[in-house]
Image (cartoon, rainbow, N blue to C red):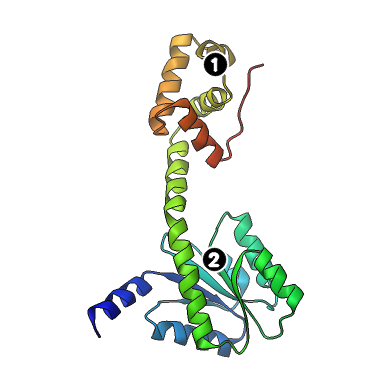
Amino acid sequence: MDIGDSQMQAQASGAAIYVVDDDDGVRAAVLDLLQAEGYAPRGFAAGADFVAGVGGEAPSCLVCDMHMPGLDGFAVAAALAREGIDIPVIFMTGFGTIPMSVRAMKAGAVEFLTKPVVPDALLGAVREALAIDAARLGGRRELAELRRRHASLTPRERETMQLVIGGLLNKQVADALGVSEIMAKTHKRKVMEKMAARSLPDLVRHAERLHIVKTRSR
């Protein structure tokens, strides 16, 4: 094995690939194919088990059967969306239709493959999905850091943040909190420091990413 092959296998082993299919034979075949390429995939027989076990910060993708008891492919994708888990999905089906493929693409699928899946087609789709997710990974890490910073705020600091991003001046923030203007400035300064915000517009952008609702003047 040359250096290039070694690097590719190292990158592959760091990826998180999930294979969800209730057919034991199909699931095993897909897992074997991916393992032969240097990946370390995880298999699940049920969509609900996958949704409960998904996680991690590595570039990820999901290879998912469309027709399964319990959660089908679309239900699995919807469950991920509800949990705020945004990873590329490759759908597989034994009997696909054009409307189904259109619906899959609208749901954000990277690829829609018909069983029996052509190995090269699946591997190509997996490489594309992992490349897409690798590009998204930086954004996910930034969001996770913002959530950690917001969680470090005290209840009073969170209230202050909502008031500040709503456009209130220091005196208005003080009146809304029932504290002195000096104390309001102190709360605001701590919010800016903990949220690593260099300016008010910066804090507003952080709040928008966290879907924090503004509190406006009364």
State if disc 1 and disc 2 touch (CB < 8 Å): no
Q: Crowdedness of circle 2 by 10 Å Cα count: few (<14), some, many (20+)?
A: many
Give the quarter of the figure containing the C terminus: top right
State the quadrant of the N terminus. bottom left
The image quadrant that residue 176 belongs to is top right
Q: Pick whichever, 68 or 38, lies toward us.
A: 38
Side (left or right) of 108 relative to 39? right
| Disc ID at residue 173 | 1
Judge the density around disc 1: few (<14), some (14-19), many (≥20) Cα neighbours within 10 Å.
Answer: many
Q: Is residue 84 above or below residue 212?
A: below
Q: Residue 49's spot in the image, x, y percent? A: 58, 70
**Front position among marks 2 and 1:** 2
Q: Which residue is mark 2?
A: 88
Eyeballing the image, is 151 above or below 57?
A: above
The local secondary structure at tag 1 comes to: helix
Give coordinates of residue 167: x percent, y percent.
Answer: 57, 21
For the residue pair 55 and 11, the one nearer the viewer reads as 11
Question: Which residue type does callout 1 highlight?
Answer: Val
Taking the view exactly as shown, the residue that stands out farthest to the left is: 3
Residue type highlighted by circle 2: Pro
Q: Is residue 150 left or right of residue 217?
A: left
Q: Residue at x 73, y 74 (%)?
A: 100
Say which quarter of the image contains residue 146. top left
For image coordinates 55% across by 59% down, the residue present is: 86
The mark nearer the N terminus, 2 or 1, is 2
Q: Which of the two residues, 84 or 103, is positioned nearer the viewer here?
A: 103
